[in-house]
Image (tube, coloured by chain):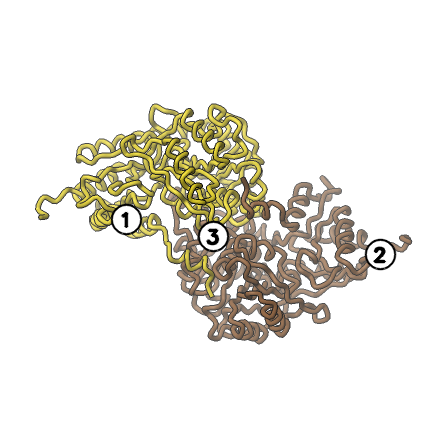
Chain colours: A yellow, B brown
Amino acid sequence: MTSRAAARLAAGAPVIATAHFEAEADPFHPVDNPSGHVNLGTAENRLLEDVLQPLLTARRTPVDTRYGLPHGTAPLRAAVARLLGGTWHAPVDPDDLVITAGATAALDIAATVTCDPGDVIVVPAPYYSAFAGDLTDRSGARLAPAPMSPDTGFALDVDVIDRTVRELRRQGETVRAVALSSPANPHGAVYPAPVLRDLLRVAAEHDLDVISDEIHAHCAFGPEPFVSVLDPAVLGPHADRVHVIWGFAKDFGLSGLKVGVLRPARPTRDAARALAYFATVSTDTQALLCDLLSDGERVSALLAENGRRLGGSHAHASALLTAHGIRHVPASAGLSIWLDLRDRLDEPTFAAEDRLWRRTRAARVNVLPGSAFGAPGPGWFRLCHAVPADLVTTGIDRLATATAPSRSTP
Amino acid sequence: MTSRAAARLAAGAPVIATAHFEAEADPFHPVDNPSGHVNLGTAENRLLEDVLQPLLTARRTPVDTRYGLPHGTAPLRAAVARLLGGTWHAPVDPDDLVITAGATAALDIAATVTCDPGDVIVVPAPYYSAFAGDLTDRSGARLAPAPMSPDTGFALDVDVIDRTVRELRRQGETVRAVALSSPANPHGAVYPAPVLRDLLRVAAEHDLDVISDEIHAHCAFGPEPFVSVLDPAVLGPHADRVHVIWGFAKDFGLSGLKVGVLRPARPTRDAARALAYFATVSTDTQALLCDLLSDGERVSALLAENGRRLGGSHAHASALLTAHGIRHVPASAGLSIWLDLRDRLDEPTFAAEDRLWRRTRAARVNVLPGSAFGAPGPGWFRLCHAVPADLVTTGIDRLATATAPSRSTP
């Protein structure tokens, strides 16, 4: 027999993953496989591989194959605490950190310790598409989008959060949290401290927790520096209501290691640790990361280089898009650009967006449609550029051709 | 705010883990720390570390830090399928395997895809103590023990399973599965094929799935060979109702890597894959295991050596126990011996068992009380012997002294 959960889960394979593995199964190569897929759909940072190669040299030892604490070895939590202390501009107690098998597990744990099944998490939309599964599949929580405006580049408008919560409560919903990506995914905005302060204030007024996915903390390349909700310039009296997620996938380009970090709100820490049993990271991989983090200067240089390369990659992609007449929201952080293809839809509907998406995939370029990100209206797509520049060039060329308004259609 | 799940999870830290980390924080050393803890409570196989040292040499590469399939990389699933094909005496399709962050996650997934919250899983008792959390914490299922008899060394009696299911249903419970450790944990029995066939037959008669935790498959050292429920000599027409768990912790002594394997019943495979997103293993660790498994002869030699060393370790511990007059159930597999200290309780109650446990911990030796294993009556303890022999000797000496019936107490 299969449980109700099994039936629900089997039905909903994440579109983002399906498209990723489809593209990765037959990858483009200019000489060997020119008709292969160009995958600009997956937010994987492949810009650091040459930098990482000489750094992944930690020797393996049987001692690192023994059981570690399920919520992370003491050495790794200490090393991450040092790193994130710099990021958050505040001392970090390693005992406040929970290491998890990827940010997916960290998001799930944050949602599970905050929400009972049926409770609602408000998310500014567009939102990171995997929120739809990560925050709900296991916790039983539901997402409610708070639609931001294309006219402001989807800037975070706290009044919209406020109105959305009030409206949901008027309808009898139990709203428990606000979750956001900061910096924003898909559109790459860096949120200024005053906006985040306002968000925490409004959340507190509504007795809500805030789940801040800061996995792109060191992926900012614009003039505005990244600020965490845990930064003293933001946090105020809300430490017990804030859950922060971080990980090694984006800032260090180590997505396959599946190492996430959760700083749960204190009242939920013991429960978060208990849930970490189900998502424990290999001690061998934890030892590798300890070794990588052991040299503070090397880490600073790596993270600075990451920002430089992402900035360069974004500038390259943005210039190409402009040259092809493809409108987009300029990003200040992250691995992706949010494309405005509304003028290339044959009608202003999500069905038309889906048709356009099929055309791009037929042209062997993978970008993801806005519907997967809860975009407030149709015609938006996310393009990830953190791959070698020639791949970005080929992909954008294909995208421009595939989406060019056809003048011959009646 | 914290969810109901968080409140429940925070309240129930597993006793087995608490005792483990308490003991590991101050470990015994004959010279450096003679008053430290001797940890014979944790089922960790430390007998292979010298054999593993020269084998853990796989080079790390950035390619192995890219995203892999969440349910396991194709190369690792292929390598594990080859290995388990030999174990199960039947060809294994790598697509039927799900790699998870430890057997804990594999057990959780099996329970979650089988049971709705509130449903019941019947377990022959005594059972693996972590079943109590692994099979229930996230799935919402509940365990119901089917008590086996001390008079037969807790041999699996399928009639007791049958009666337990009937009684639970009479009480209105929704019973969905039977779960067992095979070989048995804590008492190290190897189940013969006819008994397992009977179990599958009875489960089928009651429309139940069977969850078989075979993590000790290659830890058998007695005359009886291990037989999987997936072995053609057992399985019969029940392939769609059987979930098998395996992992690298016991058979390879690689507990810290937290790599579990689930062969879910086919109808639940897609759901199991979806849940594997929340428990994905580091690609770097998966590449290490691919390298380790690449030489079939080396693997066979390693597994044979594991059986020999566990057999030797068991014989050493058993002889010492006998010399000290400590009764126990002889094991044929696994890392532990099930001690019968009923004659050392000051009264036949679980309260007395707990008092005796406190005396052993005060004597700086960690063994776990039967209450944690759902033992049908008080006075049983699990002693793990898969550590260096001098540690076993010191631990059993301490245990004998600490539990010796005190003749001076009035």
Q: Residues within 10 Å of mark 1 (few under 14, many from 20)?
A: some
Q: Which circle marks residue A27 in the picture?
A: 1
Which type of secondary structure does the marked residue at label 3 adopt?
A: helix
Relative depth, front residue between A391 and A371: A371
Q: Residue A65 at what x, y percent from top left?
A: 55, 47
CB within 8 Å, label 2 to label 3: no
**Label 3 marks which chain's residue?**
B
Nearer mark to the viewer, of 2 and 1: 2
Q: Is any atom of residue A10 visible in this view? A: yes
Look at label 2 and name its amino acid: Pro
Look at label 1 and name its amino acid: Pro
Q: Is residue A63 left or right of residue A306?
A: right
Name the residue carrying label 2. B405
Q: Residue A302 at what x, y percent from top left?
A: 41, 30
Nearer mark to the viewer, of 2 and 3: 2
Q: Is any atom of residue B224 visible in this view? A: no
Look at label 3 and name its amino acid: Leu
Name the residue carrying label 3. B289
The residue located at (75%, 42%) in the rendering is: B35
Counting residues from the start of the chain, the first of labels 2 and 3 encountered is 3
Which type of secondary structure does the marked residue at label 2 adopt?
A: loop
